[in-house]
């Protein structure tokens, strides 16, 4: 899919500018998430502090893009695919801002965990879960950049892996807490970081749903993956392997 072309070159430029700003915001959020995860895994207090205090940039980008969308609606009265683009952008930047919030939470907990890093050893589990989350986040942003609905459907099938990793990590943390109550505080911090990772995955999934809406014109929220696949992509993707 390509953004529609219009008689007004300025209108085309406005729509493309909005989309580019979303991609810039997505790049910043992805970078912040990577830094937060690195701070968590490497027990890097300085990096964690940097992420925890830099969320304002993401918030300002959300406000700026939202205002541009409002101006386009007021001036251009977009219809059809143009209107879907504006609506999808407003929804995507909301999820990007929330991803930024979750990265900030991970960074704040990481600062405290770094003071006593070896009490609860979950590095391997957190590393694996983090890679899954970063992969989904990166690919969802790529699907938005390329307006790739088929790619978005494939990404929707990966969320279950993150949920399984969260369940496994939660059981491990519970074991640590039962064995020694002194581990409870740090185990809870690790658990909260894992919850934030899982929520980042959920927000990335939402972005994929908005890509499908933008390309296909169908709202697939609260719809099973099997139904999305069979109704809108009957010949494109085998989601049984996802």
Image (cartoon, rainbow, N blue to C red):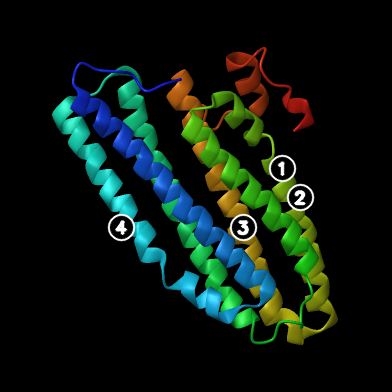
**Element carrying mark 1:** helix
Judge the density around disc 2: few (<14), some (14-19), many (≥20) Cα neighbours within 10 Å.
few
Q: Given contact means CB atoms under 8 Å apart, are the residues at marks 3 and 1 in contact?
A: no
Judge the density around disc 3: few (<14), some (14-19), many (≥20) Cα neighbours within 10 Å.
many
Identify the residue under disc 1. Answer: 160
Judge the density around disc 4: few (<14), some (14-19), many (≥20) Cα neighbours within 10 Å.
few
Q: Given contact means CB atoms under 8 Å apart, are the residues at marks 1 and 2 in contact?
A: yes
What residue is rendered at 54% in x and 74% in y?
A: 48
Query: Residue 180: image x %, image y %?
Result: 81, 84
Label drawn at residue 197: 3
**Quarter placement of the C terminus:** top right
Rendered position, 40 above or below 201: below
Q: Is residue 27 visible?
A: yes
Label drawn at residue 60: 4
Of all residues, the one furthest to the front in this rendering is: 9
Cα separation, mark 1 vs mark 4, equals: 32 Å
Q: Nearer the viewer, mark 3 or mark 4?
A: 4
Query: Residue 72: image x %, image y %?
Result: 21, 33
Q: Is residue 224 visible?
A: no
**Element carrying mark 3:** helix
Of all residues, the one furthest to the top in this rendering is: 235
Q: Nearer the viewer, residue 118 or 54?
A: 54
Cα separation, mark 3 vs mark 2, equals: 13 Å
Label drawn at residue 164: 2
């Amino acid at each position: 899919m390509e953004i529609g072309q219009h008689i007004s070159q300025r209108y085309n430029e406005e729509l493309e500018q909005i989309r580019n700003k979303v991609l810039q915001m997505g790049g910043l959020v992805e970078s912040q998430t990577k830094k937060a995860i690195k701070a968590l895994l490497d027990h890097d207090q300085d990096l964690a502090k940097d992420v925890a205090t830099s969320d304002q940039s993401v918030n300002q980008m959300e406000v700026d893009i939202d205002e541009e969308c409002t101006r386009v609606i007021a001036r251009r009265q977009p219809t059809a695919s143009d209107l879907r683009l504006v609506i999808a952008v407003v929804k995507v930047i909301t999820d990007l801002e929330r991803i930024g919030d979750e990265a900030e939470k991970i960074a704040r907990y990481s600062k405290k965990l770094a003071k006593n890093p070896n009490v609860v050893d979950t590095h391997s589990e957190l590393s694996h879960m983090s890679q899954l989350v970063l992969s989904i986040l990166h690919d969802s942003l790529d699907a938005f950049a390329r307006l790739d609905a088929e790619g978005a459907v494939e990404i929707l099938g990966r969320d279950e892996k993150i949920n399984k990793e969260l369940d496994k990590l939660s059981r491990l943390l519970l074991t640590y807490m039962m064995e020694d109550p002194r581990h409870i505080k740090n185990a809870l911090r690790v658990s909260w970081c894992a919850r934030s990772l899982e929520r980042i995955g959920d927000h990335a999934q939402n972005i994929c749903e908005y890509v499908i809406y933008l390309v296909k014109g169908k709202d697939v929220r609260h719809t099973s993956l099997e139904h999305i696949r069979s109704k809108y992509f009957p010949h494109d993707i085998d989601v049984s392997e996802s």
